[in-house]
Amino acid sequence: MKINKNYANLEENYLFATIASKVKEHARANPNKKIIRLGIGDVTLPLAPVVVESLKNAALEMGHAETFRGYGEYQGYNFLRQAIVNYYEKKGVNLTTDEVFVSDGVKSDSANILDIFHKDNVVLIPNPTFPVYVDANVMDGRKIIYAHGTKDNNFLPMPDENVKVDIIYMCSPNNPTGAHYTKAQLKEWVNYAIKNQAVILFDGAYECFVTDPELPTSIFEIEGAQNCAIEFLSFSKMAGFTGTRCSFTVISKELKREETSLHHMWLRRQTTKYNGVSYIVQRGAQAALSDEGMAQIKESLAYYRQNIITISQTLDKLGVWYTGGKNAPYIWLECPGGMGSWEFFDYLLEEAGVVGTPGEGFGSEGKGYFRLSAFGNKEDTIFAMEKFTEAVEKLKK
Ligand code: PLP
């Protein structure tokens, strides 16, 4: 018997555990101090009423013999896949329902997709990054090359013709930086992937935060992407489904490597290892995509966006460099006073009672940077930014 030794190469991710223990310790030492968490990547607003209604109705259906459902369709119910196709149509992207695979999360799909690729492939991952991409590839023992996000490239690394890779992870709008690629930039990545026969794994978990009509919300808005990209989208941030669980993966039937359809391989993988999202949840997701659902969801997104405005206006006033924000729920700022990420974390907690996320938890390029999130409560965010201002101004003195 042999275990997968690659697991020994995983770096322990102490980020959120360390944050939690530092905050707990601080709260214990300062029992009367208000502590505001602007570090969270989870949503806080409840599900839209039309979604809840649909979940309830679907649950009732499951209680009657005539409407009860057992195992569902492998790729998800057609009613949801059709709603997703319609959603894409509004972006100007034409899909067919059989190019959509409904699933329970982008986290799982963006890692599980690796099943269809050889372990000898070289993978390109941005630094800083959502940690799942790294860990899933380390578990497989795949060689990782990092695409470095820095202040100079606005945390939007571009392809390098001298670096040959097979699999490319991209996330736009990005977690943790909130940075967003333009169509022209994505076109360069698509050109690179086609030229090198690479496959782009495009994580669009935050596409719903894009307000600028010039910015792409899907890799499939870029010509040629159907021949080189797989896209993952989630209801998590769009519709508050982080605890309800529903997402989907889009693979064009045209996408082939070594004369083999990747669409077919993923279908084979999913039908073997996965039995789908519950009927009830798929009905909830369908309701989220209805006109009424989208109108209700937009209210939640506008609420979070207001927090982003509060945070970015504060940073603008203070003259702190940052990226992200406008079309994303995250702001990625340079720690004031040349502080390190953890140093600033400690300082901000101590001085302002504000909790953010140290950038270096997302990769070495995050050193000296800090992530603030828009997913908090409005009044708390305003209060937190007042305290933040006082703390940063004190540093300047
Ligand atoms: N992708 C990115 C970039 C994320 O930041 C997150 C969650 O924070 C996810 C995927 C997880 O998505 P899901 O809830 O659909 O698994």
Image (cartoon, helix red, strand yellow):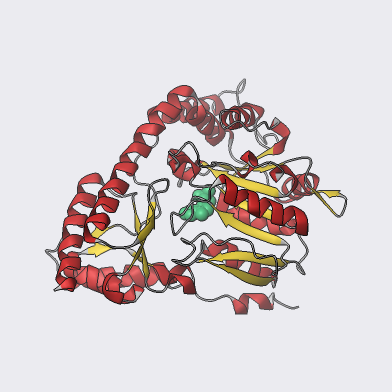
Residue 312 horizontal/vertical position (percent): 29, 52
Q: Position of residue 6 (x, y in %)?
A: 66, 76
Query: Residue placed at 54% from the left, 42% from the top?
Result: 216
Residue 35 sits in quarter? bottom left
Residue closest to the eye, 272 or 133 = 133
Which quadrant is home to the N terminus? Answer: bottom right
Q: Is residue 73 left or right of residue 342?
A: right
Residue at 59% x, 62% y is: 133
Tell me the residue at 50%/43% (across/down): 207
Horizontal side of residue 244 vs 275, given as left or right: left
Residue 58 image position (x, y, % from top left): 52, 27
**What is the total number of numbered labels drawn onto the structure image?**
0
Q: Is residue 263 visible to us here?
A: yes
- The image quadrant where one finds the C terminus is bottom left
Q: Is residue 41 above or below residue 348?
A: above
| Residue 74 shows in the view | no
